[in-house]
Image: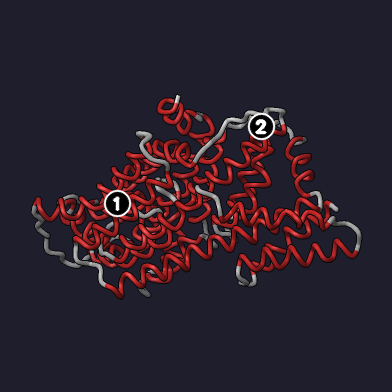
Amino acid sequence: MEWMAIALFVCVCVVLLFGYPVAFTLAGTSLVFAAIGFTTNTFDTSYLNAMPSRLYGILTNQTLIAVPLFIFMGIVLEKSRVAENLLTAMAALMGRFRSGMAISVVLVGMLLAASTGIVGATVVTMGLLSLPSMLKRGYTPSFASGAICATGTLGQIIPPSIALVLLGDVLSSAYQQAQLSMGIFSPDTVSVGDLFVGALIPGLLLVGLYLLYVMLTSSRSIDESNSEPVAPQAISGTQLINALFPPLVLMIVVLGSILAGFATPTEAAGVGATGALLLAIMQRQLNWQRLKDVMMDTTKVTSMVFLILIGASIFSLVFRGFGGERLIHDFLSNLPGGIIGAMLVVMLVVFILGFILDFIEITFVVVPLVAPILLAMGVDPVWLGIMLAVNLQTSFLTPPFGFALFYLRGVAPPEVLTSDIYRGVVPFICIQIVLLIALAVWPELATWLPDTLYD
């Protein structure tokens, strides 16, 4: 039976490599294996009886209501030229410095990540707006593309992040399951808000490391002979305030209400979605057609997320029916090094799977299988969530399959080669590995702020 579980997981990965839709691959492959198991008396179909309650639980999950609201907020901001105005203002403000454009890209990427939380939208937007400008100023294609890819993935770790919302919901269930398995029948809880707070210090530390790197190396990455004369742009205080005001207001309203305990992440997402809509109306960037496009894009992305969640639920039931969960538990428990060995193996597996799976699939498929085991071994749930988020962010950048690289390749001009993009992200991957090591050595980077705020 355990070999059938391994074969199921490998088969799912192979089918995904052929480009089939993720949700249907997870559900269809699992049901085929369940049928094979039923005919060979290696699978108990009673596991599938839990499917209706699983679906009902997904549809009535209050935490997951935050997903469409945060997606709506991000798409509204994307289509209301907030990113364009912000980048123009920051470039004019930093234009006096030699590395001013690179600094602007990092700062704008941080603000967009804190405003939208959508990685693909941030990378594409920054690629369209800032990559041509950086090339005109003489930045090498590798440095410019590396900076844009890296800062675009900040939406994975800086709240409000869709990845953290999904991870928080999965880890909450896994934490309760782990405590029940240890005989604790009044379990503690971990929430999306805990992960949001825990991600603040690592996220800001990562931004600081990015800024330090671009300030130290951008002077060597500018070829004055290939630069075009760019007239310095003057910017008034009013223009700067108008560009910075929308994302800053959303950051303060959404994150501030969560940190202060005034609102849950779901309630804060509703406030953020409403605020984004009001800002777009005030800037006169919203009409009926654009609103229709926003609603359609939000529906598509939300449907994709929930379909994947349904497919992952079927996969987990069939995988558990074949004894896969017991196999993983025995494997991780018997590794040399105890918790450290188990964490190293899980982080390596998640990193490798990040080449072929999106963070949504990994969150719904892999994390529910390994998280209860790690949490039962004594791993802090907030620290585990932040480690997984940073690890997935790193896999987003790693050649040759990093998703951020594909996003930028789709909008980059022809003179930017794929090899340039690959070379450019290597230093930023090293920076993120440094952050992972720092989190492993000092878990307080992720746990101190939630413990302090929420006692």
**Mark 1 — residue?**
218
Position of 77 relative to 375 (above/below)? below
Q: What's the mark number on residue 429? A: none
Instruction: Indicate the amino acid at tag 1.
Output: Ser
Query: For this rendering, which residue is in front, 126 or 252?
Result: 252
- Write the residue at 42% across / 54% down: 153
Instruction: Indicate the amino acid at tag 2.
Output: Gln
Mark 1 surroundings within 10 Å by alpha-carbon count, few (fewer than 14), some (14 through 19), many (20 or more) = some
Q: Quadrant of residue 36?
A: bottom right
- Write the residue at 65% across / 47% down: 368
Q: Check disc 1 and report its element: helix, strand or loop.
A: helix
Q: Quadrant of the C terminus?
A: top left
**Mark 2 — residue?**
179
Whether residue 297 can be seen here: yes
Answer yes or no: do the residues labelled 1 and 2 have beta carbons within 8 Å? no
Q: Check disc 2 and report its element: helix, strand or loop.
A: helix
Tell me: 36 left or right of 305.
right
Whether residue 219 can be seen here: no
Tell me: 332 left or right of 257.
right
Query: For this rendering, which residue is in front, 175 or 85?
Result: 175
Q: Nearer the viewer, mark 1 or mark 2?
A: 2
